[in-house]
Amino acid sequence: MENINWGELPFGYVKTDYNVRSYYRNGKWGALEVSSEETINIHIAATALHYGQESFEGLKAFRGKDGKIRLFRWQENAKRMRNSAIGVRMAQVPDELFYEAIQKVIKLNERFVPPYGSGASLYLRPLLIGSGPQVGVKPANEYLFMMFVTPVGPYFKEGFKPVKMKIEREFDRAAPLGTGSIKVGGNYAASLNALHNAHEEGYASALFLDAREKKYIDEAGPANFFGIKNNTYITPKSNSILPSITNMSLIDIAQDMGMNVERRSITVDELGTFEEAGACGTAAVISPIAKIDDIANGKSYVYTESGEAGPVSTALYKQLQGIQTGDVEDKFGWVDFVE
Ligand code: PLP
Ligand code: COI
Protein backbone atom coordinates (compact mmCIF):
# COMPACT_ATOMS: atom_id res chain seq x y z
CA MET A 1 0.00 0.00 0.00
CA GLU A 2 2.23 2.71 -1.28
CA ASN A 3 -0.22 5.53 -0.46
CA ILE A 4 -0.45 4.93 3.27
CA ASN A 5 1.98 6.57 5.64
CA TRP A 6 1.77 3.78 8.20
CA GLY A 7 3.70 5.58 10.92
CA GLU A 8 1.35 8.58 10.86
CA LEU A 9 -1.97 6.73 10.76
CA PRO A 10 -4.59 8.07 13.16
CA PHE A 11 -7.29 5.88 14.70
CA GLY A 12 -9.81 6.36 11.93
CA TYR A 13 -11.59 4.89 8.95
CA VAL A 14 -9.63 4.00 5.85
CA LYS A 15 -11.55 2.44 3.01
CA THR A 16 -10.38 -1.12 2.38
CA ASP A 17 -11.33 -3.56 -0.38
CA TYR A 18 -13.92 -5.85 1.20
CA ASN A 19 -16.11 -6.54 4.20
CA VAL A 20 -18.04 -9.69 5.13
CA ARG A 21 -21.66 -10.20 6.16
CA SER A 22 -24.02 -12.90 7.33
CA TYR A 23 -27.80 -12.66 7.79
CA TYR A 24 -29.77 -14.41 10.52
CA ARG A 25 -33.19 -15.33 9.14
CA ASN A 26 -35.75 -17.93 10.15
CA GLY A 27 -33.65 -18.88 13.14
CA LYS A 28 -30.46 -19.62 11.15
CA TRP A 29 -27.25 -17.86 10.19
CA GLY A 30 -26.64 -17.77 6.45
CA ALA A 31 -23.37 -18.25 4.58
CA LEU A 32 -20.78 -15.50 4.93
CA GLU A 33 -21.02 -13.07 2.01
CA VAL A 34 -18.23 -10.87 0.70
CA SER A 35 -19.02 -7.30 -0.26
CA SER A 36 -17.02 -4.43 -1.69
CA GLU A 37 -19.73 -1.93 -0.74
CA GLU A 38 -19.20 0.34 2.26
CA THR A 39 -22.95 0.71 2.71
CA ILE A 40 -25.74 -1.56 3.85
CA ASN A 41 -29.36 -1.62 2.84
CA ILE A 42 -31.50 -1.58 5.94
CA HIS A 43 -35.22 -1.68 6.72
CA ILE A 44 -36.62 1.67 7.81
CA ALA A 45 -38.11 0.02 10.91
CA ALA A 46 -35.02 -2.05 11.82
CA THR A 47 -34.69 -2.38 15.59
CA ALA A 48 -31.04 -1.28 15.48
CA LEU A 49 -32.16 2.14 14.31
CA HIS A 50 -35.02 2.63 16.74
CA TYR A 51 -34.31 0.63 19.85
CA GLY A 52 -30.56 0.27 19.85
CA GLN A 53 -30.37 -3.45 19.15
CA GLU A 54 -26.72 -3.25 18.26
CA SER A 55 -23.38 -4.50 19.46
CA PHE A 56 -19.87 -4.05 18.16
CA GLU A 57 -16.43 -5.39 18.94
CA GLY A 58 -12.89 -4.23 18.38
CA LEU A 59 -9.80 -6.40 17.94
CA LYS A 60 -6.51 -6.09 16.15
CA ALA A 61 -4.30 -8.07 13.79
CA PHE A 62 -0.54 -7.51 13.80
CA ARG A 63 2.17 -8.30 11.26
CA GLY A 64 5.18 -9.93 12.93
CA LYS A 65 8.86 -9.75 12.02
CA ASP A 66 8.37 -13.17 10.41
CA GLY A 67 5.71 -11.68 8.11
CA LYS A 68 2.91 -13.71 9.73
CA ILE A 69 -0.33 -12.02 10.72
CA ARG A 70 -1.25 -12.53 14.35
CA LEU A 71 -4.64 -12.23 16.04
CA PHE A 72 -4.87 -11.40 19.73
CA ARG A 73 -7.40 -13.36 21.85
CA TRP A 74 -10.19 -13.26 19.27
CA GLN A 75 -12.10 -15.89 21.28
CA GLU A 76 -12.64 -13.32 24.03
CA ASN A 77 -14.15 -10.84 21.58
CA ALA A 78 -16.42 -13.56 20.20
CA LYS A 79 -17.54 -14.45 23.72
CA ARG A 80 -18.12 -10.81 24.67
CA MET A 81 -20.20 -10.28 21.55
CA ARG A 82 -22.34 -13.28 22.52
CA ASN A 83 -22.83 -11.70 25.96
CA SER A 84 -23.75 -8.39 24.37
CA ALA A 85 -26.28 -10.18 22.17
CA ILE A 86 -27.84 -11.79 25.25
CA GLY A 87 -27.91 -8.40 26.97
CA VAL A 88 -30.07 -6.74 24.30
CA ARG A 89 -31.88 -9.90 23.14
CA MET A 90 -30.23 -10.41 19.79
CA ALA A 91 -29.30 -13.61 17.98
CA GLN A 92 -25.83 -14.79 19.05
CA VAL A 93 -23.03 -15.13 16.53
CA PRO A 94 -21.44 -18.59 16.83
CA ASP A 95 -17.67 -18.57 17.40
CA GLU A 96 -17.13 -20.53 14.16
CA LEU A 97 -18.84 -17.81 12.13
CA PHE A 98 -16.96 -15.07 14.01
CA TYR A 99 -13.65 -16.83 13.29
CA GLU A 100 -14.49 -17.47 9.65
CA ALA A 101 -15.30 -13.75 9.27
CA ILE A 102 -11.98 -12.76 10.84
CA GLN A 103 -9.95 -15.04 8.60
CA LYS A 104 -11.80 -14.06 5.46
CA VAL A 105 -11.88 -10.30 5.99
CA ILE A 106 -8.17 -10.16 6.80
CA LYS A 107 -7.11 -12.33 3.85
CA LEU A 108 -9.25 -10.26 1.49
CA ASN A 109 -7.66 -7.05 2.76
CA GLU A 110 -4.15 -8.32 3.33
CA ARG A 111 -2.58 -5.34 1.60
CA PHE A 112 -3.95 -3.14 4.41
CA VAL A 113 -2.20 -5.01 7.22
CA PRO A 114 0.45 -2.53 8.38
CA PRO A 115 4.08 -3.64 8.21
CA TYR A 116 5.98 -4.89 11.24
CA GLY A 117 7.60 -2.06 13.17
CA SER A 118 5.28 0.68 11.87
CA GLY A 119 3.41 0.93 15.18
CA ALA A 120 0.15 0.54 13.23
CA SER A 121 -2.15 -2.48 13.14
CA LEU A 122 -5.26 -3.70 11.37
CA TYR A 123 -8.35 -2.95 13.45
CA LEU A 124 -11.24 -5.37 13.01
CA ARG A 125 -14.72 -4.12 13.71
CA PRO A 126 -17.36 -6.86 14.09
CA LEU A 127 -20.87 -5.46 14.17
CA LEU A 128 -24.20 -7.13 14.98
CA ILE A 129 -27.49 -5.34 14.42
CA GLY A 130 -31.19 -6.02 14.64
CA SER A 131 -32.08 -5.66 10.96
CA GLY A 132 -35.67 -6.86 11.03
CA PRO A 133 -38.57 -4.42 11.50
CA GLN A 134 -40.52 -3.83 14.71
CA VAL A 135 -42.61 -0.87 15.70
CA GLY A 136 -43.45 -2.05 19.20
CA VAL A 137 -40.51 -2.34 21.59
CA LYS A 138 -39.56 -5.92 20.79
CA PRO A 139 -36.46 -7.72 19.54
CA ALA A 140 -36.10 -8.15 15.78
CA ASN A 141 -36.65 -11.45 14.01
CA GLU A 142 -33.70 -10.83 11.68
CA TYR A 143 -30.09 -9.89 12.39
CA LEU A 144 -27.08 -8.87 10.36
CA PHE A 145 -23.53 -9.64 11.42
CA MET A 146 -20.76 -7.77 9.61
CA MET A 147 -17.06 -7.26 9.89
CA PHE A 148 -14.95 -4.55 8.33
CA VAL A 149 -11.30 -3.68 8.83
CA THR A 150 -9.31 -0.49 8.82
CA PRO A 151 -5.60 0.11 9.39
CA VAL A 152 -5.09 2.23 12.51
CA GLY A 153 -2.51 4.05 14.58
CA PRO A 154 -2.89 4.98 18.26
CA TYR A 155 -6.34 5.87 19.61
CA PHE A 156 -5.08 8.80 21.64
CA LYS A 157 -3.02 10.93 19.30
CA GLU A 158 -0.29 11.11 21.94
CA GLY A 159 0.33 7.35 21.48
CA PHE A 160 2.37 6.09 24.41
CA LYS A 161 2.80 9.60 25.83
CA PRO A 162 0.99 10.49 29.05
CA VAL A 163 -2.32 12.33 28.66
CA LYS A 164 -4.55 14.47 30.86
CA MET A 165 -7.97 13.23 31.94
CA LYS A 166 -10.79 14.76 33.95
CA ILE A 167 -13.20 13.23 36.42
CA GLU A 168 -16.67 13.34 34.91
CA ARG A 169 -19.24 14.76 37.29
CA GLU A 170 -22.00 15.85 34.92
CA PHE A 171 -22.85 12.68 32.98
CA ASP A 172 -23.07 8.94 33.64
CA ARG A 173 -22.14 6.48 30.95
CA ALA A 174 -24.04 3.49 32.33
CA ALA A 175 -26.53 2.71 35.09
CA PRO A 176 -25.67 0.32 37.94
CA LEU A 177 -27.89 -2.44 36.54
CA GLY A 178 -27.77 -1.15 32.97
CA THR A 179 -25.74 -2.14 29.93
CA GLY A 180 -22.30 -0.88 30.98
CA SER A 181 -20.76 -4.36 31.03
CA ILE A 182 -21.70 -5.19 27.44
CA LYS A 183 -20.52 -3.52 24.26
CA VAL A 184 -23.63 -1.86 22.86
CA GLY A 185 -23.89 1.43 21.00
CA GLY A 186 -26.13 3.08 23.58
CA ASN A 187 -23.29 3.22 26.10
CA TYR A 188 -21.21 5.17 23.62
CA ALA A 189 -24.07 7.51 22.75
CA ALA A 190 -24.43 8.22 26.46
CA SER A 191 -20.72 9.06 26.69
CA LEU A 192 -20.56 11.51 23.79
CA ASN A 193 -21.37 14.72 25.65
CA ALA A 194 -18.87 13.97 28.39
CA LEU A 195 -16.15 13.10 25.87
CA HIS A 196 -16.94 16.13 23.74
CA ASN A 197 -16.68 18.44 26.73
CA ALA A 198 -13.48 16.77 27.91
CA HIS A 199 -11.88 17.25 24.48
CA GLU A 200 -13.01 20.87 24.32
CA GLU A 201 -11.37 21.45 27.69
CA GLY A 202 -8.10 19.92 26.49
CA TYR A 203 -8.42 16.46 28.04
CA ALA A 204 -7.81 13.20 26.21
CA SER A 205 -10.78 11.59 27.96
CA ALA A 206 -13.31 11.76 30.76
CA LEU A 207 -13.05 9.35 33.68
CA PHE A 208 -16.52 8.12 34.51
CA LEU A 209 -17.54 7.49 38.11
CA ASP A 210 -19.95 4.88 39.41
CA ALA A 211 -23.44 6.17 38.78
CA ARG A 212 -24.88 5.29 42.18
CA GLU A 213 -22.49 6.93 44.62
CA LYS A 214 -20.20 9.03 42.41
CA LYS A 215 -17.41 7.85 44.61
CA TYR A 216 -15.59 5.15 42.67
CA ILE A 217 -13.68 5.15 39.38
CA ASP A 218 -15.54 3.25 36.67
CA GLU A 219 -13.66 3.62 33.42
CA ALA A 220 -11.76 5.99 31.17
CA GLY A 221 -14.00 6.66 28.18
CA PRO A 222 -13.40 3.77 25.77
CA ALA A 223 -10.81 2.12 28.04
CA ASN A 224 -10.46 0.57 31.51
CA PHE A 225 -8.52 2.31 34.25
CA PHE A 226 -5.57 0.97 36.26
CA GLY A 227 -3.35 2.41 38.96
CA ILE A 228 0.05 1.20 40.16
CA LYS A 229 1.47 1.40 43.67
CA ASN A 230 3.71 -0.74 45.88
CA ASN A 231 4.38 -3.24 43.11
CA THR A 232 0.61 -3.74 42.74
CA TYR A 233 -1.62 -3.43 39.68
CA ILE A 234 -5.02 -2.14 40.83
CA THR A 235 -8.06 -1.96 38.57
CA PRO A 236 -11.74 -1.27 39.31
CA LYS A 237 -14.25 -4.00 39.94
CA SER A 238 -17.60 -2.69 38.79
CA ASN A 239 -20.75 -4.06 37.17
CA SER A 240 -21.01 -1.05 34.91
CA ILE A 241 -17.68 -1.21 33.10
CA LEU A 242 -16.76 -3.20 30.03
CA PRO A 243 -14.65 -6.25 30.91
CA SER A 244 -11.59 -5.25 28.90
CA ILE A 245 -9.60 -8.00 27.24
CA THR A 246 -6.52 -5.79 27.36
CA ASN A 247 -7.00 -5.30 31.10
CA MET A 248 -7.44 -9.07 31.64
CA SER A 249 -4.19 -9.58 29.73
CA LEU A 250 -2.31 -6.90 31.68
CA ILE A 251 -3.43 -8.57 34.91
CA ASP A 252 -1.80 -11.82 33.79
CA ILE A 253 1.31 -10.02 32.53
CA ALA A 254 1.63 -8.04 35.78
CA GLN A 255 1.37 -11.24 37.83
CA ASP A 256 3.91 -12.89 35.57
CA MET A 257 6.25 -9.93 36.18
CA GLY A 258 6.01 -10.58 39.91
CA MET A 259 3.47 -7.89 40.71
CA ASN A 260 0.43 -8.22 42.94
CA VAL A 261 -2.98 -7.62 41.41
CA GLU A 262 -6.06 -6.15 43.06
CA ARG A 263 -9.42 -5.93 41.40
CA ARG A 264 -11.61 -3.85 43.65
CA SER A 265 -13.36 -0.53 44.01
CA ILE A 266 -11.09 2.49 43.68
CA THR A 267 -12.27 5.70 45.33
CA VAL A 268 -11.51 9.09 43.83
CA ASP A 269 -9.43 9.86 46.94
CA GLU A 270 -7.23 6.84 46.27
CA LEU A 271 -6.11 8.44 43.01
CA GLY A 272 -3.76 10.51 45.14
CA THR A 273 -1.87 7.41 46.28
CA PHE A 274 -0.91 5.88 42.92
CA GLU A 275 2.62 6.04 41.55
CA GLU A 276 1.36 5.56 37.98
CA ALA A 277 -2.02 5.46 36.29
CA GLY A 278 -3.20 4.47 32.86
CA ALA A 279 -6.07 3.61 30.57
CA CYS A 280 -6.07 0.35 28.63
CA GLY A 281 -7.99 -1.11 25.73
CA THR A 282 -7.59 -2.57 22.26
CA ALA A 283 -7.64 0.84 20.62
CA ALA A 284 -5.79 2.67 23.40
CA VAL A 285 -3.36 -0.22 24.15
CA ILE A 286 -1.95 1.54 27.25
CA SER A 287 -2.43 5.23 27.47
CA PRO A 288 -0.40 6.47 30.43
CA ILE A 289 -2.10 9.20 32.45
CA ALA A 290 -0.04 12.27 33.34
CA LYS A 291 -2.68 14.02 35.39
CA ILE A 292 -6.31 13.72 36.47
CA ASP A 293 -8.25 16.87 37.30
CA ASP A 294 -11.27 16.76 39.59
CA ILE A 295 -12.45 20.22 38.63
CA ALA A 296 -15.52 20.44 40.88
CA ASN A 297 -13.37 19.69 43.93
CA GLY A 298 -10.41 21.80 42.82
CA LYS A 299 -8.07 18.80 42.98
CA SER A 300 -5.45 17.41 40.62
CA TYR A 301 -3.66 14.10 40.78
CA VAL A 302 -0.31 14.17 39.00
CA TYR A 303 1.56 11.01 37.97
CA THR A 304 4.30 12.31 35.74
CA GLU A 305 5.58 15.71 34.70
CA SER A 306 8.42 14.47 32.51
CA GLY A 307 6.23 13.72 29.51
CA GLU A 308 7.25 10.07 29.79
CA ALA A 309 5.33 7.05 31.04
CA GLY A 310 6.37 5.47 34.34
CA PRO A 311 8.54 2.33 34.47
CA VAL A 312 5.77 -0.14 35.28
CA SER A 313 3.39 1.11 32.57
CA THR A 314 6.30 0.99 30.12
CA ALA A 315 7.20 -2.58 31.06
CA LEU A 316 3.56 -3.71 30.77
CA TYR A 317 3.20 -1.99 27.41
CA LYS A 318 6.35 -3.55 25.98
CA GLN A 319 5.36 -7.01 27.12
CA LEU A 320 1.82 -6.74 25.74
CA GLN A 321 2.93 -5.36 22.38
CA GLY A 322 5.74 -7.89 22.22
CA ILE A 323 3.29 -10.77 22.58
CA GLN A 324 0.93 -9.23 20.03
CA THR A 325 3.61 -8.81 17.37
CA GLY A 326 5.46 -12.04 18.14
CA ASP A 327 8.61 -10.43 19.58
CA VAL A 328 7.91 -11.89 23.03
CA GLU A 329 7.09 -15.56 23.60
CA ASP A 330 3.33 -16.17 23.73
CA LYS A 331 3.44 -18.16 26.93
CA PHE A 332 -0.25 -17.57 27.69
CA GLY A 333 -1.44 -18.96 24.35
CA TRP A 334 -3.15 -15.73 23.31
CA VAL A 335 -2.07 -15.55 19.70
CA ASP A 336 -3.61 -17.20 16.64
CA PHE A 337 -2.47 -16.81 13.06
CA VAL A 338 -4.19 -15.85 9.88
CA GLU A 339 -4.05 -19.13 8.01
N1 PLP B 1 -14.08 0.05 28.00
C1 PLP B 1 -14.83 0.47 26.97
C2 PLP B 1 -16.03 1.28 27.26
C3 PLP B 1 -14.45 0.13 25.66
O1 PLP B 1 -15.18 0.55 24.63
C4 PLP B 1 -13.32 -0.65 25.45
C5 PLP B 1 -12.94 -1.05 24.11
O2 PLP B 1 -13.27 -2.09 23.65
C6 PLP B 1 -12.57 -1.04 26.57
C7 PLP B 1 -12.97 -0.68 27.82
C8 PLP B 1 -11.35 -1.90 26.40
O3 PLP B 1 -11.69 -3.23 26.12
P1 PLP B 1 -10.74 -4.15 25.30
O4 PLP B 1 -9.46 -4.18 26.01
O5 PLP B 1 -11.40 -5.47 25.28
O6 PLP B 1 -10.62 -3.56 23.95
C1 COI C 1 -11.65 -0.70 21.27
O1 COI C 1 -10.73 -0.48 22.05
O2 COI C 1 -11.62 -1.61 20.44
C2 COI C 1 -12.82 0.12 21.25
O3 COI C 1 -13.82 -0.38 20.89
C3 COI C 1 -12.69 1.49 21.67
C4 COI C 1 -13.49 2.45 20.89
C5 COI C 1 -12.97 2.84 19.58
C6 COI C 1 -14.93 2.40 21.07
Image (cartoon, rainbow, N blue to C red):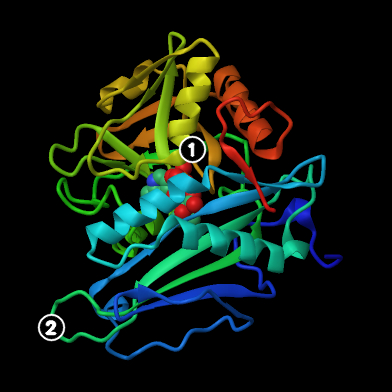
Query: Residue at image x 27%, y 52%?
Result: 173
Query: Residue at image x 49%, y 28%?
Result: 250
Looking at the image, is mark 1 or mark 2 earlier in the sequence? 2
Q: Position of residue 225 (x, y in %)?
A: 40, 34
According to the picture, the residue beneath numbered tag 1 turns out to be 246
**Does 259 appear above or below 221?**
above
Q: Is residue 208 left or right of residue 11?
A: left
According to the picture, the residue beneath numbered tag 2 turns out to be 136
**Does 324 appear above or below 58?**
above
Query: Residue at image x 79%, y 50%?
Result: 115
Q: Position of residue 333 (x, y in %)?
A: 57, 32
Mark 1 is surrounded, within 10 Å at the Cα level, by few (under 14), some (14 to 19) or many (20 or more) other residues, namely many
Task: Give the amino acid type for the residue marked by disc 2 in the picture.
Answer: Gly
The one of 100 and 79 positioned closer to us in this rendering = 100
* Residue 112 visible in this rendered orientation of the protein: yes
The disc placed on residue 192 is none
Q: Position of residue 76 (x, y in %)?
A: 44, 45
